[in-house]
Image: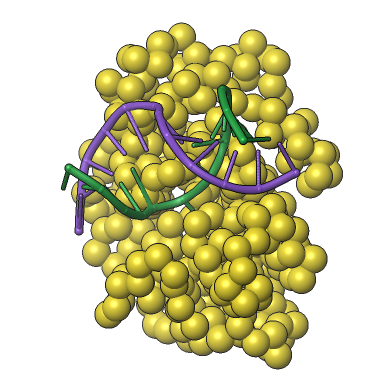
Chain colours: A yellow, B green, C purple
Amino acid sequence: MPELNPSHSREFILAEDDVNGPLNLEETISSAQTTEPEWIRNEQSYVDVEKINDTYVKYSVKQNGSSDHFTILVEYVTPPSMSISQTDLKQHLEKVLGLGDDLRVFYETFSADKPLSLTFGPVRGLRLMRGTNLYESLICSILSQNNSAKRWNGIARLLMKQYGRKIRFPDGSSWFLFPRPKDIAGLTPRELQKATSMGYRAKSVITVSRMIQNKELDLESLVNSSYENAFENLLHLYGVGPKVADCFLLYGAGQPRAAPVDVWIHRIANGLYFKGRKMPRPAIASFLRDRFGCWAGYAQLYLFHYARRRKFGTAKLPRHVSAF
DNA sequence: TCCCAGGATCAAG
DNA sequence: CTTGATCATGGG
């Protein structure tokens, strides 16, 4: 990714020292959250392109300093015929990076909650990211099933390159947008598999795309109902089970009570809260919702990220993980 | 070669 | 209502 050319770009300071508590941009961006493809790393900053108010914006976000004393610097460009106000871009970034979530309250509320509070130090400043495109969030969640974060990200990038619209920016760079439902709806599973190597997930991706294209499925209205209702309706979609539904509801739809239970959370929660007994995944999910309420998504993120971080550190922890 | 990756589906018991 | 095989695919 080329640097943003200063002659075409603008910049501003997004935040300093406090955004409802600390912020660790690097942990946040590179924590494999299933909202959308991970931002592109460029030196010390992270680059992404989004459609905001019908304007394509390429932005680069950089954190100087520590999680508690910092400056967040934003540099951005739009195509020549477009423009966006700093206020709108700031609002967008605050949502996407979860800067509205008051981490001080989260840490304070569960400061005495033993296993969870152990993660507060190591992962301090980690925030829950939110997607801004429901279709993109749902597809990415589907791609993540039985897949590594690195690999589903690669598949998503291929999907963008093959079927997304190409946008050019005045700094000389270009970017492929995430495809729309109608860009995918006409493909056969075999075509999609060959182009992206997404494997058996192609059938699900195409099915969902066609349902949206045919107006059999309206994600906006689905999301605008209760958590329970939305969850139930999502399970009817082919290739969407409990974990994918919760990922979509948490990261895509911003339902903070959703707590996706993947293999990691399953193992961790069984070890931490059920003395090694293997509880079924739905039981873990409702346990997390009951225990952590509107912070369930955050609790899940912190437990997940802390345990994962340990795995990729010194010791490999196969099978029965004892990360705590 | 087998196992795993931020799982879901289907058939059998 | 539970359990186990199967599903594509790339990396360790």
Can the viewer see residue A154 in this picture? yes
Q: Nearer the viewer, residue A110 or C5?
A: C5
Q: Is residue A43 above or below residue B2?
A: below
Q: Position of residue A157 (x, y in %)?
A: 33, 37
Figure quadrant of residue A261:
bottom right
Q: Position of residue A152 (x, y in %)?
A: 37, 42
Q: Nearer the viewer, residue A278 or A262?
A: A278
Q: Position of residue A56 (x, y in %)?
A: 46, 36
Tell me which residue sits at (44%, 29%) in the image: A201
Tell me which residue sits at (35%, 67%) in the image: A318
Left or right of A148, for residue A212 = right
Counting labels gives 0
Tell me which residue sits at (60%, 63%) in the image: A278
Can the viewer see residue A21 in this picture? no
Left or right of A282, for residue A201 = left
* The residue positioned farthest toward the bottom in the image shown: A112
Q: Position of residue B13 (x, y in %)?
A: 62, 35
Q: Is residue A221 above or below residue A13?
A: above
Q: Nearer the viewer, residue A228 or A15?
A: A228
Left or right of A221, for residue C6 = left
